[in-house]
Image (spheres, grey):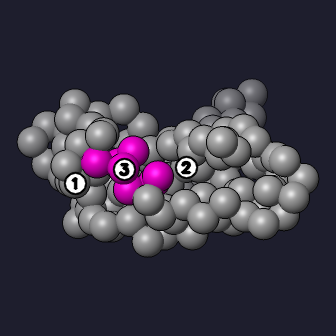
């Protein structure tokens, strides 16, 4: 009976030690983490009004969208890096007619942003941006 108990104890402790050995090492986890909510939000140079002006002056309404009279809002998400560059651009919701592609093009060409901050440090921050396409 002692042998069976000792056997199970040895197996149990062996498994728990092996599980501990397989845990990933955490080294500067904040370096690569992408924050969704931060203490200080990222900011387009000049603020929100400047962002609206930038979008209005740089969006070229796609011909297909004009021909099909497509209007609406495209939602784009991207990451603002610690140095303010815009990366990882993805369309979350598209309205078609080339509007999603145009939204990505305009975001790719944005100037550097003022990065988000968490605990006083610059951090990578996820940013969602709605872009309106209206025929007037």
Does 75 appear in magenta?
A: no
Helix, strand or loop under label 2: strand
Where disc 1 sits, the SS reads: loop
Q: Is residue 67 left or right of residue 117?
A: right
Q: Residues within 10 Å of mark 1 (few under 14, many from 20)?
A: some
| Residue 1, placed above or below residue 46 | above
Q: Are marks 3 and 2 in contact (CB under 8 Å)?
A: no
Q: Main secondary structure of the magenta part?
A: helix
Name which quarter of the figure residue 71 lies in.
Answer: top right
Q: Residues within 10 Å of mark 3 (few under 14, many from 20)?
A: few
Of the two numbered discs 1 and 3 on the same chain, state the one appearing first in sequence.
1
Q: Is residue 105 above or below residue 12?
A: below
Kindly identify which residue carries mark 2: 77
Residue at the image position 57 percent from the left and 69 percent from the top: 105
Residue picked out by circle 3:
53
From which residue to which does the magenta span run? 50-56
Foreground residue among 41 and 27 = 41
Q: Residues within 10 Å of mark 2 (few under 14, many from 20)?
A: some
Which label sits on residue 66? none
Q: Nearer the viewer, residue 23 or 112?
A: 112
Q: Which of the two discs, 1 and 3, sits closer to the camera? A: 3
Label located before the other in sequence (1 or 2): 1
Residue 72: % across, % down = 72, 38
Q: Are marks 1 and 3 in contact (CB under 8 Å)?
A: no
Q: Name the residue rendered at 90%, 53% in the picture.
A: 68
């Amino acid at each position: 009976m002692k042998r069976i108990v000792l056997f199970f104890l040895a197996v149990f402790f062996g498994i728990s030690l092996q599980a501990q050995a397989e845990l990933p090492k955490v080294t500067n986890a904040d370096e690569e983490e992408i924050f969704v909510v931060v203490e200080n939000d990222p900011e387009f140079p000049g603020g929100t009004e400047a962002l609206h002006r930038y979008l209005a002056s740089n969006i070229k309404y796609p011909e297909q969208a004009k021909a099909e009279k497509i209007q609406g809002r495209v939602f784009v998400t991207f990451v603002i890096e610690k140095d303010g560059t815009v990366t990882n651009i993805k369309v979350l919701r598209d309205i078609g007619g080339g509007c999603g592609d145009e939204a990505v093009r305009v975001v790719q060409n944005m100037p550097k942003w003022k990065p988000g901050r968490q605990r006083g440090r610059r951090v990578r921050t996820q940013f969602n941006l709605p872009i309106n396409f209206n025929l007037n």
